[in-house]
Amino acid sequence: MTNVLKANKISNELNLLEQQRETDKLLSEIYENTGNYKKALLCHQQFKILNDSLFNKENIQKITQLEYEYKYKQALELASFRELKLTKTVKSTFQNLEKSQRNLLLGVIAFLTMTLILGTIIFFLKLRHAKSKAQNIEIEQRLLRFQMTPHFIFNSLSVL
């Protein structure tokens, strides 16, 4: 009994709740067995108070742990939602980029095709212009020959 009283005194000084509870329980049982019911009741009440205190402390720790787990799960869900949203944004940006590249390629092809068609049209117009110029020169030469021929004949006859 003296050892239990010393242990109770030391645990009270060091504020060790679990040891205080155990020593109060032992003292309550010892006093009950020795017939000192008043001290047994006081020690038992002290045991109950400490037991409730430790029980509440454990419950608070469990509740705190559950709160942290819940907040952690919420943070994970939020992060997953943000990741999904970012993934969608990246996909849409990538699709828009592909569309822009395709439109640029189609624009370049259309520009080159139009340039080729206009170049061909200009080439044929210049070719036709050159042919018509050549025909005009040829017709002009024929006209000059036809004008020269009567003049030449007249001169030839006058010489004779």
Image (cartoon, helix red, strand yellow):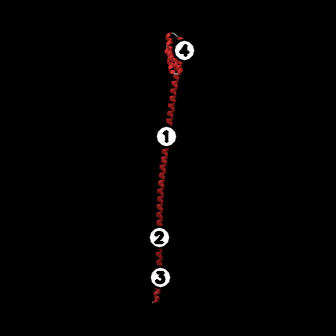
Q: Which residue is mark 3?
A: 148
Numbered disc in front, either 2 or 3: 2
Q: CA distance from mark 2 to mark 3?
A: 27 Å
Q: Is residue 118 above or below residue 74?
A: below
Q: Sequence-wise, which precedes: disc 1 or disc 2?
A: 1
State the image coordinates of residue 72 (x, y, percent, origin top left): 50, 33
**Tag 2, which secondary structure?**
helix
Q: Which residue is mark 1?
A: 83
Tell me what residue is drawn at x 49 percent, y 44 percent. 90
Tell me what residue is drawn at x 53 percent, y 15 percent. 43
Assign the C terminus to one quadrant of the image.
Answer: bottom left
**Tag 1, which secondary structure?**
helix
Q: Sequence-wise, which precedes: disc 2 or disc 3?
A: 2
Density class for disc 3 (Cα within 10 Å; few <14, some 14-19, many ≥20) is few
- Is there a contact, CB below 8 Å, between mark 1 and mark 3? no
Numbered disc in front, either 1 or 3: 1
Q: Sequence-wise, which precedes: disc 4 or disc 1?
A: 4
Q: Which residue is mark 4?
A: 42
- Is there a contact, CB below 8 Å, between mark 2 and mark 3? no
Q: Which mark is residue 130?
A: 2
Q: Is residue 126 above or below residue 26?
A: below
Density class for disc 1 (Cα within 10 Å; few <14, some 14-19, many ≥20) is few
Q: Sequence-wise, which precedes: disc 4 or disc 3?
A: 4
